[in-house]
Amino acid sequence: MGYGRLGKHEPEPSQPEPLTGQPDYNMSPPRTTKRTKLKLLLFFSFAFIIASAVSVSLLIKFRTTGSGESEAAIRARPTIAISRTCSRTRYPTLCVNSLLDFPGSHTASESQLAHITMNVTLQRLGKALYFSSAISHFEMSSLVRSAYEDCLELLADSVSHLSRSLNSAGSTQDVLTWLSAALTNQDTCTDGLEEVRGPVRNVMEERLRDLGELVSNCLAIYAAASGGRNEDFSGVPIGNRRRMLAAGGSSGGVPRWLSRRERVLLDMPVAAIQADIVVSKDGNGSVKTIAEAIKKAPEYSTRRTIIYVKAGRYEEDNLKVGRKKTNLMFIGDGKGKTIISGGKSIFDNMTTFHTASFAATGSGFIARDITFENWAGPSKHQAVALRVGADHAVVYRCNIIGYQDTLYVHSQRQFFRECDIYGTVDFIFGNAAVVFQNCSIYARKGLPGQKNTVTAQNRKDPNQNTGISIHACRIMATSDLMPMKGNYSTFLGRPWKPYSRTVVMLSHIGDHVHPRGWLEWNTSNFALDTLYYGEYLNYGPGSALSQRVKWLGYRVINSTVEASQFTVAQFIFGSSWLPSTGVAFLAGLSF
């Protein structure tokens, strides 16, 4: 079909990058300003101090004496605990070798090995980030620079995720979420590098070698140590099983991570809200641009910062709420009134990750009453309107408009409520744990002969607690597609990665959706046995099940217990965080 996610397109392919020299692991980093260098040194010193401190404590705690056998001899072979622990991973040889090299591992218990594995991986991530930054001064094309910068950002995020996992008193699901996100980050980085050629890619691949596998092993070991494999519900393929947890309470249907004040804010009239920062293009606010507002917001804030964006069309370059900008809430004047727009696409020689008109990775991100748009058009292929990789993110009463790859739900826990989402190919994609509730999802007219796919979920590892849940929504066609729906087949989803997981529950499905329901990835048999695609009590002319695909991974869900696994309460554990945001939500299956 020629419309694959990363298929061929018209711009000339990138040429190999000229490098003045290829660094090795012992090279010195390039000269920078004293301030930048100091920040880098402090950052990495902090990361390594954490890992070293844990290492030393483990060494002191676990070292035995008087065994009569040299430490080298003991470390030359795996213990029963190491062998048993590593047998649960997808890369057992790498697991054993990485643990044998770590002090204290030969006397550690299985539960302690989970922490040691994270220490090993954190150290490797920190080194990869440090040495990858050493080639930032090399000459690169725009596409190579885009892929390279993606990797630096994603590596830094992963260092943060692993550090939080080691040092946080968070719940089991918190740690599984952060480890899942770190693995997704690594996958996104390597996906971008696969689109370029030359020495920069070669250097980066060497820096990143085995990192994805190490994070995968962390995830598998932690999931096993936390008992996640013992409470699976029966009947779900092994690659798709996930832990059953108590639903907990709810507050009108939203997760409890939102405070009472935030719940009030989500429905409070704009005129009654006292914003911390006001954005107005005409100068009648605190700042004139959204970028200025983000810059003014505090870093690592535990207090909610409210940014009111007045009506208008805002098209700014590189709008991003970074990891350090936490608990930011953007409030607009309504759908179609406050518009954040952009037109970047892969035709601008950048990665899909880079094309977003607006991106958010800072935890606690909330957007309300805003339109996010990418106007690049169907001929430009991948062009993201909104990318979200923030944990405990809420998008409420927003329009998200584009064509291919409109909404990138990249990673961590997210909730979308009363949003209108428009697109053509894979227009809801990514590897977050995300629930869409009471949303209208519109397939629109794309390129001639093109198939529409609502979702492309990219869960790569069976231990990731991720997936797309479409609950109590409406899947419809736009007015321009309806008269021509016979020429543009629409499907509920296709598998981007091997353990792709998407569920549609209690939703209206229009007659523009093909009777088969789901589509193969580029006509291949890829992932058809390992994916998990489910439908539960949907209605409407496109919901008939008699002609649905017969794949091993597809299932008609008949059990409320199984369906409940994909609700707000159990899939994103929203009853613990959504109530504080103030957004209405349904915690269980039914209203």
Image: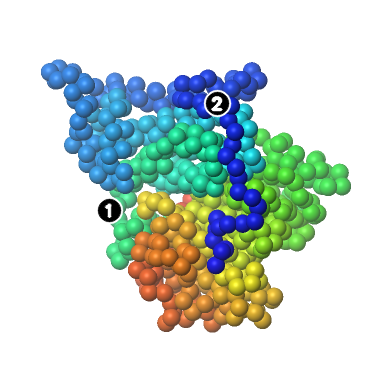
The local secondary structure at tag 1 comes to helix
Left or right of 521: which side holds 260? Answer: right
Residue 78 picture quarter? top left
What is the residue that sits farthest to the left in this orientation?
68
Which residue bears the numbered disc 2?
Answer: 21
Residue 48 picture quarter? top left
Residue at horizontal 42 percent and vertical 29 percent from the top: 123
Residue at horizontal 28 percent and vertical 42 percent from the top: 92
Q: Position of residue 59 (x, y in %)?
A: 29, 22
Residue 313 in view: yes
The local secondary structure at tag 2 comes to loop
Above or below — where is 98 with respect to 566?
Answer: above
Q: Amino acid at mark 2?
A: Gly
Residue 250 in view: no
Q: Tell me which numbered mark, 2 or 1, is placed earlier along the sequence.
A: 2
Nearer to me, 346 or 215: 346
Dot 2: few (<14), some (14–19), or many (≥20) neighbours within 10 Å? Answer: few
Nearer to me, 139 or 520: 139
How many numbered circles does the render carry? 2
Looking at the rendered structure, which numbered label has been put on residue 230? 1
